[in-house]
Image (cartoon, grey):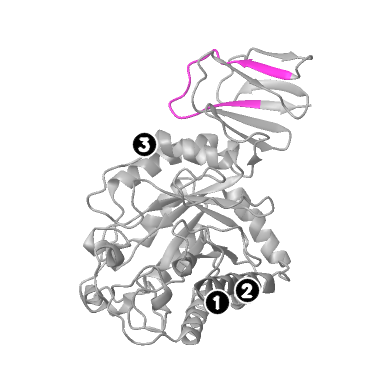
Amino acid sequence: MKKLIIFLCFFFSLQVIEAQSSYTPSAENKAAREWFADARFGLFVHFGPYALLGSGEWVMNTRPIDRENYLRVQNFFDPQDFDAAAWVSMAKNAGMKYITFTSRHHDSFSNWDTKQSDWKITNTHYQKDLLKELAAECQKQDIKLFLYYSLLDWTRDDYQWRTGRTGQKSGRTAPSDWNAYINFMKAQLTELLTEYGPIGGIWFDGHWDQTADENRTEHAAAVDWHYNELYNLIHTLQPSCLVANNHHLPPFAGEDFQIFERDLPGENKEGYSGQAVSDKLPLETCATMNDSWGYRITDNKYKSTKELVEFLVRAAGYGGNLLLNVGPMPNGKIQSEFVERLEKMGEWTKQYGETIYSTQGGFIRPQTWGAITQKDKKYYIHILQKPADNQLSLVFPATVKSVKWFDSPQKVTWDFSNKTKTTTILLDRTMNDYDTVLVVEMK
């Protein structure tokens, strides 16, 4: 009987995916995809009342904390030092082209003045609509705003919590009402897409809560997420709004870019992103600057600026974007360790942005020594770790016309073997701190 139920769930989930196969992107949607593919660098912001507890955005589930106690944080959550202009300026100066902000995380708290719930930012001491302030500033500074939206919910009774893999200790006992929950999400998404100006994309998360696979790569789901309805709603309300889903599976029809969590496309070193890599959709890797998404007061494992620049370059080498996260403190300020690293990355993007923005991934995937990006007839060879023999040998897909350093007039010594079709470049200079770039132009 158990096997039959699993089979039926699997068959049902395939039917849901198949039902979406007729999706055809609009002209606005295609243009937005092209913009996104060129953007290369974005800011992820995880922020909500969980910041008060200083243990990350999963604290309600991991501690665990029952719903009655957790909802009390609304009474003293007050991000009085939130400064939308400072957040957006920080992202823009870092060379980021968009911000993805957590409108609603798994604890169901809404960072806007939703009419669908009282568990929201305007019912805190802060009282103001934080999202409205952020959206206005993004428009002012010409930064696109994307919105993270949680599919799963740890506090609402109507969510089908009994079949969920998380949120089981929140104290819920009432029967769920799945249709009511789907309608709740539709109503909230309608608010977000009609009351806050142009939204670059909706970034879904939580599909994996209703799967049996701990590694989050199982297709079968215990519920019908009504993706066809949700995705159509988004594309109808704002045709240029992109849809993505952090389900750790190959893209479903109706999705406009593919997400990889903590890993570069196809690498899966962290175990979250073992899905096949799309060759049709733009790609995005989301990553943290320390080990945490939401504010964790004990997390001092900050990645160096060099590591972050390398992550950005390697993502571009795969033809993907890097969505780099900050978890603001409960007062709304972004801690200095994040700010300082983004300032340094901004110095790098101001000088080397040409080598990643509006480029394609290289003709070979990133290697130990670095990565390749391409723009028209130019290949940008990013040397992140100098080879021990001080040279680099590559077989280019066309005839090499010239080889130059991106940031120096120093002559580059290189040689082409007609027998092996290999171009060998001598790396006879001192390497830069983060990344040393060669420009190889084809005939």
User: x%, y% of residue 136?
Assistant: 46, 67
Which sits in the foreground, 248 or 381?
248
Location of the C terminus (image quadrant): top right
User: x%, y% of residue 56?
Assistant: 30, 58
In the rendered structure, the answer to whether residue 365 lies left or right of residue 312 reads: right
Residue reaching furthest to the front: 1
User: x%, y% of residue 247?
Assistant: 52, 62
Instruction: Give the mark, 3 or 2, whose residue is nearer the N terminus.
Output: 2
Magenta range is 422-439
Amino acid type for the residue under numbered disc 2: Val
In the rendered structure, the answer to whether residue 44 lies left or right of residue 78 reads: right
Residue 357 position (above or below residue 410): below
Work out how far the residue at label 3 is from the one at label 2, CA to CA, in angstroms.
43 Å
Per the image, the residue denoted by label 3 is 304
Q: SS of the residue at dot 2?
A: helix
Instruction: Give the mark, 1 or 2, whose residue is nearer the N terminus.
Output: 2
Name the front one of labels 3 and 1.
Answer: 1
Q: SS of the residue at dot 3?
A: loop
Q: SS of the residue at dot 1?
A: loop
Q: Are marks 1 and 2 in contact (CB under 8 Å)?
A: yes
Instruction: Give the mark, 3 or 1, whose residue is nearer the N terminus.
Output: 1
- Mark sitting on residue 224: 1
Work out how far the residue at label 1 is from the one at label 2, CA to CA, in angstroms.
7 Å
Amino acid type for the residue under numbered disc 3: Ser
